[in-house]
Image (cartoon, coloured by chain):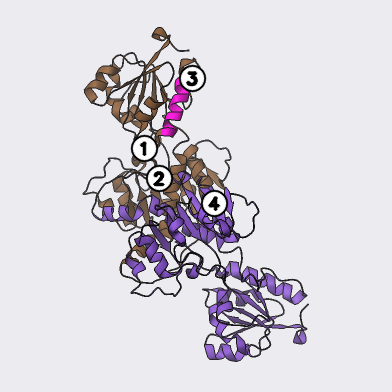
Chain colours: A purple, B brown
Amino acid sequence: MWANHSEGRLRVLLVTRVSGLEEELVNRALPGIDLQRTKKEPDTLKALADAEVVVADPVLVAHLLDQATRLKWLQSTYAGVDTLFTSCSRRDYVLTRMKGVFGPLMAEYTLGHILSRERHLPELYRYQQDRKWKPARYRRLSELVLGILGMGDIGQELARAAKVFGMTIWGLRTRRESLPHVDRLFTPDQLADFLSGPDYLVNVLPSTPATRGFLSGEGLKACRSSAVFINIGRGDVIDEDSLVRAIQEEWIAGAVLDVFPEEPLRPDSPLWALPGVTITPHVAAFGWAKDIADIIEANLVHYQSGEPLDHLVDWKRGY
Amino acid sequence: MWANHSEGRLRVLLVTRVSGLEEELVNRALPGIDLQRTKKEPDTLKALADAEVVVADPVLVAHLLDQATRLKWLQSTYAGVDTLFTSCSRRDYVLTRMKGVFGPLMAEYTLGHILSRERHLPELYRYQQDRKWKPARYRRLSELVLGILGMGDIGQELARAAKVFGMTIWGLRTRRESLPHVDRLFTPDQLADFLSGPDYLVNVLPSTPATRGFLSGEGLKACRSSAVFINIGRGDVIDEDSLVRAIQEEWIAGAVLDVFPEEPLRPDSPLWALPGVTITPHVAAFGWAKDIADIIEANLVHYQSGEPLDHLVDWKRGY
């Protein structure tokens, strides 16, 4: 399936800022692999001209790929590969991505923020500063509906974790097939029905032409007015004006936002100070060097043996 | 097993401040039951003189029970019945308690505070006020050991919820029998070994002569210096001076405290402002009227039919 490699060794260009990943891969001393590493963009650009196999953070290479005339395979260190679609027009190489490593972290983030909000932790932290003893009632998670936009590996892991607290799970996905832990499944044409139920609405959709702006305009008007929108997918599923409006018009009660159309979120964005809105700096799921290296290593072995690669991106679907 | 009831009807004295419980029980119109309700202590005292069956919050009746000369059965609306041991010397009646209704709420509280701490939510809330975009690394729960002091129904529910996030679970209990979700089980004589592992140490022990002051003195010296102590059991498992010392001497890194030897926590307690300490006002697990009423109703039916009651308190064990 793959071209021959000179002298049986495979040169792999590694361009990443994922904490500890470079060290992890170097330390593994993968058999038959020569790791070439670049840090600065001019060096990366030069190395790309000659590279057949690249392991990279999409944001570090997408705009340079036109120069990679010999590129056969790019292994993304991220789950989201949208930059490779938007900053580059090439579709003539094999693209693989991360999968299965971010779900548990996304679940931690989502449940952590839901529990913090339901249990009034921000208020309790303030009361403590004033040495104030002030109990307040709360809802229990078993009374709440969690709606998940995007039922891939991350959405399914989220459903599994939320279910342990007895939440009712509604999911939205393109394919209509039942999934464990999901109480009701909707397709995109049933969006308004889907939005009418959840107390928390979590977006984990990838960024594709089909999902960009999916909730923009009056999309969130179908939500319960008490609903909270959590975005840990991609920031462009809704434009900022639409989101601000949804909160100001009280279509929804608030939001927990980890991703934005432009990051870092600019200091003058109205989102920072909007009531009911929590802003976090794209931290829902950091890559763990070991997990990512495991997937890279497995795929390098596949490549060397001419086997099919794991977690192939479908250029048509966009993820 | 039980005495005859005049005219086939059972009079039940109900003394509770659990939100909505009185209404819930009244609305159920339990067959054959006459609910007598008192709010003020003099009325309660008077009614107790004549009462055979009492459903009550322990704190509202414990100090009055010497007057309840006809008392046969008391159904506590709480899981913790220690007040009935400490504020009253009588052991000549049947005592039943709540069980199985607080575990899920305790799990929400515990995981919520663990996730808030690990994901730096208090810092992120402050950064947001300053419109500051500042990502920081965090640990994932699957790297952490949760130690649970007390593996009854609450401890087991906690283990089940923490396991979904991949936490390693260590448990301490009197009986040595394996439990689902628990990776290592210790007995009280192995306390120092048990304490040496957990990143989070959660106390859900009831208050009994055996558990009072169990961690006082230098008990927490055996912990990891990075450990955080979470107390959702009873406040008297460790005295305040010992806890303050454990944190000041850096035997542990902090605490999340929901229960205290005296509540409300007095404004001049050093705990309020100790670094690494979170104080909450005994809110980990509120009683939900419906759940509590279900247990009361089931036990009233048992009592009326002369069947054994659920969730009997063992006067010797103390819970």
* Residue beneath disc 2: A139
Q: Are marks 4 and 3 on the same chain?
A: no
Q: Give the residue drawn at x 50%, y 69%.
A: A213
The residue indicated by pointer 1 is B212
Residue type, label 3: His
- Seen in the image, is A54 located left or right of residue B110? right
Q: Do marks 3 and 2 share a chain?
A: no
Helix, strand, or loop for circle 1? Answer: loop
- Say what amino acid the circle numbered 4 marks: Trp
In front of the other: A182 or B157 = A182
- Does the stretch in magenta take in B297? yes
Instruction: Residue B191 in the image: state x and y as whole percent.
Output: 46, 45
Disc on the earlier residue, 1 or 3? 1
| Whether residue A33 is visible | yes
Residue A310: percent from the left, percent from the top? 69, 68
Residue bearing the label numbered 3: B302
